Amino acid sequence: MDINNITCYLSRAKTGGIKRGLGLAEDTADSAISCQQIGPIIIDDKIKLNNKKGQVVFQKRTSLIFKKLQVVRFYDKQRNTLI
């Protein structure tokens, strides 16, 4: 479920070199996210009801076996905000 009028920017470090090309190098765990409201936000009732589990909005593997990067969105009912 996409929410209109929110734009998020995700940055992360990527390992380069020959090992990366062969899939043997692992990316570091460094990452940052910034989200901005660019217009009026209407939160769907489905998101409000599913606030305990959260919703994965982005996921990418960062290593061959174990590591993955994911962004999970939660709804804070008390403050009426997205986290």
Image (cartoon, grey):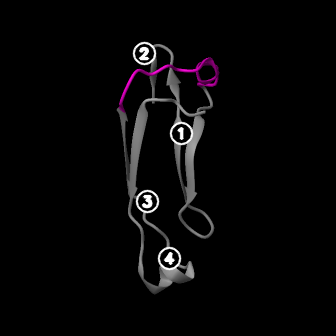
Is disc 4 placed on a helix, strand or loop? loop
Q: Is residue 16 magenta?
A: no
| Residue extent of the magenta highlight | 37-51
Is disc 3 placed on a helix, strand or loop? loop
Q: Single out the residue that lies furthest toward the bottom.
A: 18
32 vs 17: above or below = above
> Mark 3: which amino acid?
Ala
Q: Which residue is identified by label 1?
A: 72
Q: At 58% from the left edge and 20% from the top edge, which residue is drawn?
A: 44
Within-10-Å neighbours for mark 1: few <14, some 14–19, many 20+: few
Q: Is residue 45 magenta?
A: yes
**Label 3 vs 1, first from the N-terminus:** 3
Q: Are marks 2 and 4 in contact (CB under 8 Å)?
A: no
Q: At 56% from the left edge and 67% from the top edge, which residue is drawn?
A: 63
> Mark 4: which amino acid?
Ala
Task: Give the quarter of the figure containing the N terminus.
Answer: top right
